[in-house]
Image (spheres, rainbow, N blue to C red):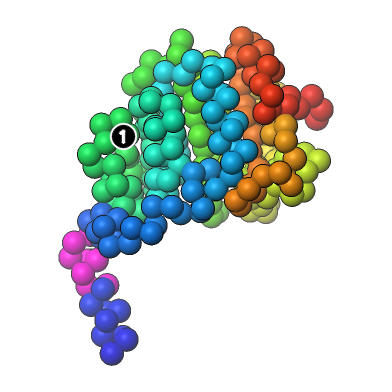
Amino acid sequence: MHEDVMGLKSLTRKIVGDKVAGMTDYYRFPELKGSWGGPFNGQILRRNIFDELLKTIHFSAIAETGSYRGTTTEYLHKTSGLPVYTVELNERIYGYVKGRFLFCKGIFVSQGDSRLFLRRLVDNLDCATQRIFFYLDAHWGEDLPLADEIRIVFSKCPQGVVMVDDFEVPGDSGYGFDDYGGGKVLNLGYLKQIREDLQVAAFFPAIPSESETGAKRGSVILARDPGVVNALRTMRTLTLHSGE
């Protein structure tokens, strides 16, 4: 019986496609809306950082790579009131997010590779003089697009601000981070060449992990423009990394 049910589900997916199956998931499994304990992995301090960023930098738009279930996507839009452009590689999960925001005029959902998405976006938004917030969370598996994503952003959007999820916080092992091996550890070593080439400043959470909630994943905030960097220096929730 179990094999028959699984076979029927597989046949159904082939008929309707992963995108439609994902959209159906949104209505069938409402509990998925709160994935990872809420926005930003359920982390209140991460939300505080974002909230202070909004007060410090006057962004014109927000871009997100790695939509997943759209929990953080929704928070980004509702908190800022800004248009949010988000991309998801997995077609079924994309279908879920598309269904979730089908009637939301301020959230624009795309499906595909995050690098292609960002290249199109920075060209279409004419980013040269705009301050845009980029939340990069499309890293998983063997293909790690993060370095390319950062280069794309800062080559076309020098006044942008980037936040990377799952990043090692120097001196605080309580914050979790991703390690894919073979030079693919999300830490300052991974960013060394990028920071040297583009003169990018790195900021980290100013509050220790023991005070954080939720999944306690680490993050780094990157900026290139001197005016933006100076503005970030004034934030109480961030601290500038000055070492190697």
Can residue 110 be seen by looking at this rendering?
yes
| Up-down relation of residue 174 to residue 56 (above or below) | below
At 55% from the left and 48% from the top, the residue drawn is 42
Q: Position of residue 107 (x, y in %)?
A: 32, 34
Viewer-side residue, 75 vs 67: 75
Q: Position of residue 175 (x, y in %)?
A: 70, 47
Instruction: Give the residue type at disc 1.
Output: Phe
Viewer-side residue, 51 vs 160: 51
How crowded is the residue under tag 1: few (<14 C-alpha within 10 Å), some, or many (20+)? Answer: some
Q: Position of residue 83 (x, y in %)?
A: 35, 27
Lateral position of residue 121 relative to residue 138, left or right: left
The answer to whether residue 19 is magenta is no
Lateral position of residue 239 relative to residue 38, left or right: right
Read off the magenta span. 10-17
Can residue 148 be seen by looking at this rendering?
no
At 39% from the left and 57% from the top, the residue drawn is 32
The answer to whether residue 11 is magenta is yes
At 68% from the left and 50% from the top, the residue drawn is 176
Q: Position of residue 143 (x, y in %)?
A: 52, 49
- Quadrant that contains the C terminus: top right
| Up-down relation of residue 226 to residue 160 (above or below) | above
The picture quadrant where one finds residue 181 is bottom right
Q: Magenta residues: mostly which secondary structure?
A: helix
Total tally of numbered discs in the picture: 1
| Up-down relation of residue 131 to residue 83 (above or below) | above
Query: Which residue lies under the disc numbered 1?
Result: 108
At 60% from the left and 51% from the top, the residue drawn is 214
Lateral position of residue 133 relative to residue 29, left or right: right
